[in-house]
Image (spheres, rainbow, N blue to C red):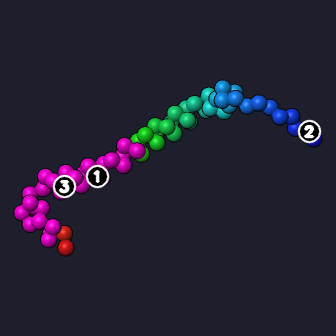
Amino acid sequence: MSMSKKNVSFSWAFKEFIWPRRKVVSFGLILIIFRSLSGLVLPYASKTLIDDSNTFKRYGCTILY
C-alpha cells in the first residue's frame, strides 16, 4: 500500500474539517468564552464582600476564625 504525501494547507483543513462542523465549533468557542468570564465572578464577589461589608470594618479579620 503506497501512501502519497499531500501538501496540507490551512484553507484545505478549514474547508474539510471546521466549516462542516461550524455550529459545534461555534458552540465550543462560546462555552470557552463563558467559562473564562465566569472565572471572574468569584474574585469580584469576594472583593465586594470584603471591601463593602460593614462586618469586616467592625470586627476585622477575627470574625473569620
Residues in magenta? 36-63
Compared with residue 28, is residue 58 higher up or lower down, i.e. above or below? below
Q: In the figure, is residue 47 to the left or right of 39? A: left
- Residue at image point 43% right, 40% down: 33
Q: In the figure, is residue 54 to the left or right of 64? A: left
What type is the residue that disc 3 sits on?
Leu
Q: Quadrant of residue 50?
A: bottom left
Compared with residue 32, is residue 18 higher up or lower down, i.e. above or below? above
Compared with residue 45, is residue 10 higher up or lower down, i.e. above or below? above
Question: Which residue in the rendered view is the most extreme toward the right?
Answer: 1
Q: Nearer the viewer, mark 3 or mark 2?
A: 2
Question: Which residue in the rendered view is the most extreme toward the bottom?
Answer: 65
Q: Nearer the viewer, residue 20 or 39?
A: 39
Graded by Cα atoms within 10 Å as few (under 14), some (14 to 19) or many (20 or more), the crowding at tag 2 reads few
Callout 3 secondary element: helix
Q: Looking at the rendered structure, which numbered label has been put on residue 49?
A: 3
- Residue at image point 30% right, 48% down: 41
Mark found first going from the N terminus, 3 or 1: 1
Q: Quadrant of residue 12?
A: top right
Question: Which residue in the rendered view is the most extreme toward the left?
Answer: 58
What type is the residue that disc 1 sits on?
Pro
Q: CB of mark 3 within 8 Å of CB of mark 1?
A: no
Residue identifier under label 2: 2
- Residue at image point 56% right, 36% down: 24
Q: Looking at the rendered structure, which numbered label has been put on residue 15?
A: none
Mark found first going from the N terminus, 3 or 2: 2
- Residue at image point 19% right, 73% down: 65
Graded by Cα atoms within 10 Å as few (under 14), some (14 to 19) or many (20 or more), the crowding at tag 1 reads few
Q: Between marks 2 and 1, how big is the CA–CA gap?
A: 57 Å
Q: Looking at the rendered structure, which numbered label has been put on residue 43?
A: 1
Mark found first going from the N terminus, 2 or 1: 2
Q: Is residue 20 visible?
A: no
